[in-house]
Image: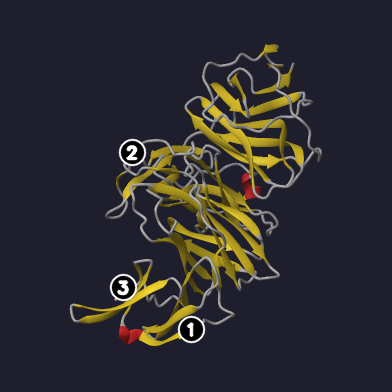
Amino acid sequence: MKKYILSCTMALLSVIGANAMPKLCFETTSDSRTATTVLEASLVDSIVHKEVAGEKYIDVYVGGTRVQEFSPKMVNRVFYAPDPQAIDGKLAATIPCKGSKSETSNNSFSDGESPYDNDTILTYRYDKNNKQLSIKFISVVGGCCADDWFTILEYHGDTIGLSPSQVGQANCNCICAYDIPVVLENIEARKYYLSTSVYSNGGISIDLSQNEEGVVLDIPEKTTTKVSECKSPWDEEITDGAETEQTSDTLVSFMVTRNSAIITSHNQSFSCCTPIETKVTVSPSRDTIYVDSYGIPGGEECDCMCEYDITTEIRKLKPQQYTFIVDGTIFKVDLDIPQPCCTEGEAGFTGAILDGTRGFFDKSSGCMNGYYMDIKEDGPVEDINEGGPVEESSRTSPKQDYPERIETADTLISYQYNPETGELTVVSYGLMLNCCTDKFSVTWVEKDIITINATESGERCRCTCTFDITTKVIKVKAQKYLLFVDGYNFEIDLSQNTEGVLRRE
């Protein structure tokens, strides 16, 4: 008996077609747990009894394809019509091909751009009054010649499984992309865990009590954050806020495999009483992942500081090159050519980044206006300490996407350096960001190049504000650096000038 068919964690397994039809139900018991398999009676074309190596089986076929296999010993009864209060559903519409091509050729798709070149797994919309959840799977790959589609539905408690399949001959040396709409009935306004055969990189969590509609993207995302116990507490009043000696020189350690990453940011200093979380942000180009640790505001206040090791797990990685920027520390991996590592049978990368110059987000100002305004191109800037225009460097920033800046901002960027502590403070002024998002900055350092970019994450609203974003960079030497700050690049010599301001001409 194939264990996955009569899983002891399933409470229901149904096959649903395009229209409401009588249901043929098999009630089975395995390992003292009962499961019900429900099939559209009109789709079932045969039920075959067979014997393999002395064991008897019952196979159920839809469109000539075996979709279920039972052991007669496990079947309690066969009946029509499932519980009317149970989760049920149907395909919501006919499903045309979006674009096709031969499986054995490299020719382009029949209607131009490949329909597979998108990050959308599915969209959903919930009708609370009717307890109806509409799901559309985007660009599911199938054969061009099949007769129709049906969907295998599995659920147990808060877990729902959906597996779109084709009826009839699917293989004819031609593949298509299909958008598959499914409507589920008797869905409560709560959190569900959705698994689907069209996406193999883990399950999808949707909380219908919080969001009644949404889009699920196939991009890297955080799964968990784990924080170590306090490693070395100290009294902030005694040290006067100064940084204490770290317990080790490891900044970041990591294990990155083909589809997931476990990354630890070491020796991060926070108040002993502050809850700690991490934020994972993916660049629009999908090849840069930022991991930033932060203290959750509103917690208990105390004068004790601690060092923590903060571990973040990320999934939905793809076989491509990634740049990770973890609390200002940068490392790169190429999962297109992974190396043997980690556990037996896995491939990927493990490593650690040791101590050095690094930066972190310090604070954001409040909103300085609450209306949308058109932003024009920024003009040239000058450094008042140098008395002339800033010369553009021939070197380019490794990150080209950055927020727009309000055109009326006279002061663009300021910096201040403390040679005694090695701390550099950089403020970027007048940045146009959404009113409702969380603001922060990311910093990475490569030799004498320091790059700082303001960014945002979280729920957006129809409001734009200007903000000043402050970033601190520590363990900075009194030497020349090339700074890239939110679209501007300029050189500073901290052995000559410990502070400076960039202004618009």
Q: Check disc 2 and give the amino acid type.
A: Ser
Q: Is residue 139 visible?
A: no
Report how far apart the C-alphas of labels 1 and 3 lie in the structure: 24 Å
**Labelled pair 2, 1 in contact (Cβ < 8 Å):** no
Residue pointed to by mark 1: 80
Q: Camera-side residue: 44 or 349?
A: 44
Q: Is residue 320 above or below residue 494?
A: below
Q: Residue at x 54, y 61 (%)?
A: 205
Name the colour scheme: secondary structure
> Nearer the observer, disc 2 or disc 3?
2
Question: SS at mark 1?
Answer: strand
Q: Is residue 315 above or below residue 486?
A: below
Q: Camera-side residue: 36 or 482?
A: 36
Residue 105's mark?
A: 2
Q: Earlier in the sequence, mark 2 or mark 3?
A: 3
Looking at the image, how many numbered discs can be counted on the residues? 3
Q: Position of residue 447 (x, y in %)?
A: 47, 27
Q: Is residue 264 above or below residue 495?
A: below
Q: Check disc 3 and give the amino acid type.
A: Lys
Q: Position of residue 268 (x, y in %)?
A: 54, 48
Report how far apart the C-alphas of labels 2 and 3 lie in the structure: 36 Å
Residue 2's mark?
A: 3
